[in-house]
Image (cartoon, grey):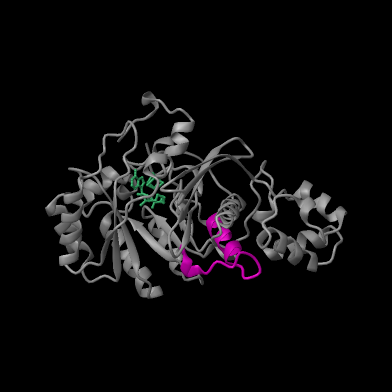
Amino acid sequence: MNPSIAEPTSTQPAQSRTVLPRSGRPQGLYDLSLSELEAQVISLDFPAYRARQLWGWAYRQYVTDFQEMANIPAALRAALAAQAPLSLLEPVRAVAADDEETIKTLYQTGDDQAIETVLMLYPNRATVCVSCQVGCAVGCAFCATGLMGLTRNLSAGEMVAQVVGATREARRRGRELTNIVMMGMGEPLQNYAQMMKFINIIHDPEGLDIGARRITISTSGIVPRIDALAEEPLQLNLAISLHAPVDELRSRLVPINRRYPIATLMAAVDRYIARTGRRVSFEYALMRGVNDQEQTANDLAALLRGRLCHVNIIPLNPVELLPYERPDPAAIERFASILGTAGIPTSVRYSRGLDIDAACGQLRAKEQGLSAASLTPS
Ligand code: SAH
Ligand code: SF4
C-alpha cells in the first residue's frame, strides 16, 4: 500500500538547490524561472529582455502557441518551440458541476499519464486544486489517489500548466483566479523541490504574481519537510491532513503516521507556528463510524486546544469500491459543535463536485477503469 516513501535528506529550503531537468522529459517553458529563461534566450544569441516579453505572452496573455507571440523573432520562437515547449499537458476532458461553478479537467502528460485539476468558483474567489504527482505513495485508506500508488512526480512546469489552464478557464467565465490549493493528486511534501520551484514561478511578480498567502500546501504530515517549509521565505498557508486524534486510528487511515506519529507531527506543527506566526489548518475527512464519534471529537479538541489553528471538517467524498461512508448531517453537526464548544475554530467544508467525482483522484480512477481487483483498501 505504501511502498517507498523517500526519506528527506535535508531541511534546507529547496530554493537554494539547483533543480535539474528530469531525464527523458523535456523542460517546458513553464518549467523555467525568469532568470533561467533569460539564460536560455542569451544562449540562443538573443538579448535578455526577450525573456520578459516571452513571460508576458505566457503569463499575461496565456497564449497556447509560440506562433501567437507577435513581437518575438521567428527564429527565437522556433528555437524555443523545440527546446522549451509550451504545451506540457493536453486537456482530455473537462466536466462541470455545481451549476458550472466546479470544473474538473483531466489532462494527459507527455508520457501518457493522466492527472486532474479542479477549478472552484466562489462568489468572492476562484480556487484551483493542483495535482503534484501521478498517484501518491502515502496510500491513505479512503483516498482514490492513494489506491494508485506513485507513478512519478510532476515537474514544476506540469504544475504551472495546470494553473495557467485554470486561469484561462476562469477568464472564459469572466473570472480571475485568486487561490491555489495543493490538494489534488499527490503529496506535495514528497515532491518538495519541484513544488517549491512551481510556487516561486507562479509567485513571480513578472508572471502570474500569485501572493504567497493565497497558496495553501496540504500534507499528510511529512515532518522534516514541514520544518523545511517553515524556513522558506514565502509565507504560505499550511494544512495538515489529520483525520484522527489518536495514533492507532490515524495509522490505519494515513499510513505515514507510522513513521511520523501524532506527537512528532504536532511538535513540527508547533515549530512551524512558532517560526512563522501563521495559523495552521487541520483537515478532517469525517467518516461514519470510523472517526465521527463523540469521544473522538473530544480527543481531537483535547489534542488541538491552545494551538493557533483551525479545523476544516470535510464530510467524506465516498470512493467507489472503498468501504468508507459520509456521516449523516446530524452526526456532522454534532462533531463540529463539540469542537466549537471546546473553543476550537471549526468549519464544515463540503467538497465540491460530488457528482463529477471531484475528490482527489476519482475522475482519473474512473477514466482508467480501475477494477475491484486493483483496489485493495488497507
Ligand atoms: N496529499 C495531500 C494533499 C492532497 S489530498 C494531503 O493528503 O493532504 C487533499 C485533501 O483531501 C486531504 O486532506 C485528503 O486527506 C483529502 N481527501 C482525500 N480523499 C478524500 C475523500 N475521499 N473525501 C474527502 N477528503 C478526501
Ligand atoms: Fe496521498 Fe493525500 Fe491521498 Fe493520502 S490523501 S493518499 S497523502 S493524496
**61 vs 370, nearest the viewer:** 61
- Say which residue appears at 52% left-offset and 65% top-offset: 13
Q: Which residues fall within the magenta stretch?
A: 193-215
Asked if one can make out residue 52 in the rendered structure from this viewpoint, the answer is: yes
Which residue lies most toward the left here?
295
Quadrant holding the N terminus: top left
**138 vs 326, nearest the viewer:** 326
Q: Is residue 286 above or below residue 280?
A: above
Q: Is residue 305 above or below residue 44?
A: below
x, y (%) of residue 295?
A: 12, 53
Asked if one can make out residue 149 in the rendered structure from this viewpoint, the answer is: no
Quadrant holding the C terminus: top left
**8 vs 1, nearest the viewer:** 1
- Say which residue appears at 20% left-offset and 49% top-offset: 329
x, y (%) of residue 288?
A: 20, 43
Q: Is residue 49 magenta?
A: no
x, y (%) of residue 147?
A: 39, 36
Q: Quadrant of residue 338?
A: bottom left
Q: Main secondary structure of the magenta part?
A: helix
**234 vs 271, nearest the viewer:** 234
x, y (%) of residue 130?
A: 50, 52
Q: Quadrant of residue 210?
A: bottom right
Residue 125 shown left or right of residue 337 in the figure:
right
Q: Is residue 210 magenta?
A: yes
Residue 354 shown left or right of residue 33 in the figure:
left
Total numbered labels: 0
- Say which residue appears at 67% left-offset and 41% top-offset: 24
Q: Is residue 121 above or below residue 320?
A: below
